[in-house]
Amino acid sequence: MLDDGYLLPPFEMPEAESIRMTLLNILRWFDNYGYLNSSGKKLVIVYDDMCHLLRYAIKRQHLHPGIEAFVKEAEHCVDRFHFVHNHKGVWCDLNVNPFTMEELKGVNTEICEQRFK
Ligand SMILES: [Zn+2]
């Protein structure tokens, strides 16, 4: 989801739910754009399993500048529904908590679940 609530991509990605494929897709989508919006603020990337994706990327950020940019230049969050039900750990609370992110106030973080059944 982009900072103004747009879905990226605007379609479901069947067979692409592995962490590796998700990271590769994100790197491809943002390769030419970076992770700042037009106001210079970090984009907030919302993903239902962001805690695993972000930890996967942190461990591999030394391997590619695109992975390092994703880790350091973007904001990362789990959507509210999955955060409440699946993300109970301290690390998740500190690093991917949608309830503490000011930028997500008023944003429907569950739109993917609602649109893709
Ligand atoms: Zn988590």
Image: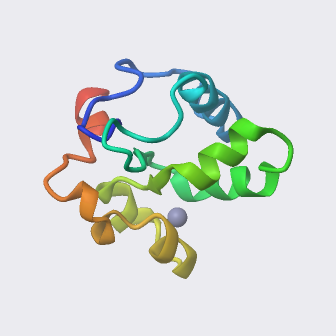
Q: Is residue 91 above or below residue 8?
A: below
Residue at image location 57% in from the left, 22% down from the top? 32
- Residue sitting nearer the eye, 86 or 111: 111
Place residue 114 in its image quadrant: top left
Residue 103 location (% of width, % of height): 26, 57
Place residue 52 in its image quadrant: bottom right
Is 15 left, or right, of 99 in this rendering? right
- Is residue 59 visible in the rendered image? The answer is yes
Is 21 left, or right, of 17 in this rendering? right
Is 35 left, or right, of 60 in this rendering? left
Q: Quadrant of the N terminus?
A: top left
Place residue 55 in its image quadrant: bottom right
Residue 28 location (% of width, % of height): 62, 23
Is 9 left, or right, of 32 in this rendering? left
Residue lying furthest left: 106
Residue 24 location (% of width, % of height): 67, 29
Residue lying furthest bottom: 90
- Residue sitting nearer the eye, 22 or 64: 64
